Image (spheres, grey):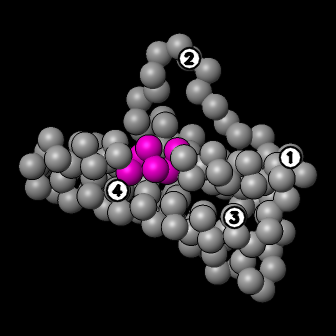
Amino acid sequence: MQIKMEVQTSTKPPNLLNRTKTFSKNILQLCKLVKITYLNKNIIDHVLRSGTSIGANYCEACETTGKRDFANKIQISKREAKETVYWLELLVSTELDKPLLTSATQLIDESQQLVKIMGAIYDKSK
């Protein structure tokens, strides 16, 4: 069972909207390949919700008209990214096979980076 993670191939840094969408797609790929058990069913559900919510809230933030609403949506994205780290770490503890473990670890790293990015954007927006 090999997961095919989507990666950015351009030499330019990806814009954040594309990066969060790619992250969501990779979350979907991981969750699709994990064998659902009684122990991990709830974890997978939370990974799906929080992991795909990061980009959705960032997308909403980009469409707001007010500074306060923008900051609020960015803060929500940051919280969802933190929550995703939590749930992915729990998922890793459920004895994933090696390819899925590697993918989950990469997603944890990306989610931690998104936490930092959203935090920096939030700090600048205040």
- Which residue is under mark 4? 78
- Which residue is under mark 2? 10
Mark 3 and mark 2 lie on one chain; the one further toward the N terminus is: 2
What residue range appears in magenta?
110-115
- Which residue is under mark 3? 92
User: Where's residue 48, x and y in %?
Assistant: 59, 64
Distance, label 4 to label 3, CA atoms, is: 21 Å
Looking at the rendered structure, the kind of residue marked 1 is: Gln
Relative to 125, is 93 on the left or the right?
Answer: right
Relative to 60, is 17 on the left or the right?
Answer: right
User: Where's residue 73, x and y in %?
Assistant: 27, 57
Relative to 33, is 121 on the left or the right?
Answer: left
Mark 4 and mark 2 lie on one chain; the one further toward the N terminus is: 2
For the residues labelled 4 and 2, say whether their Cβ atoms are less than 8 Å apart. no
Name the dominant secondary structure of the magenta segment.
helix
For the residues labelled 1 and 4, say whether their Cβ atoms are less than 8 Å apart. no
Q: Nearer the viewer, mark 3 or mark 2?
A: 3
| Viewer can see residue 108 | yes
User: Where's residue 57, x and y in %?
Assistant: 36, 55
Distance, label 3 to label 2, CA atoms, is: 30 Å
Q: Which residue does the image show at 64% across and 31% down from the upper left?
A: 7
Looking at the rendered structure, the kind of residue marked 3 is: Val
Mark 1 and mark 2 lie on one chain; the one further toward the N terminus is: 1
* 124 in magenta: no
Q: Quadrant of residue 5?
A: top right
Secondary structure at badge 2 equals: loop
Q: Nearer the viewer, mark 1 or mark 2?
A: 1
Q: Residues within 10 Å of mark 1 (few under 14, many from 20)?
A: few
Q: Residues within 10 Å of mark 4 (few under 14, many from 20)?
A: many
- Which residue is under mark 1? 2
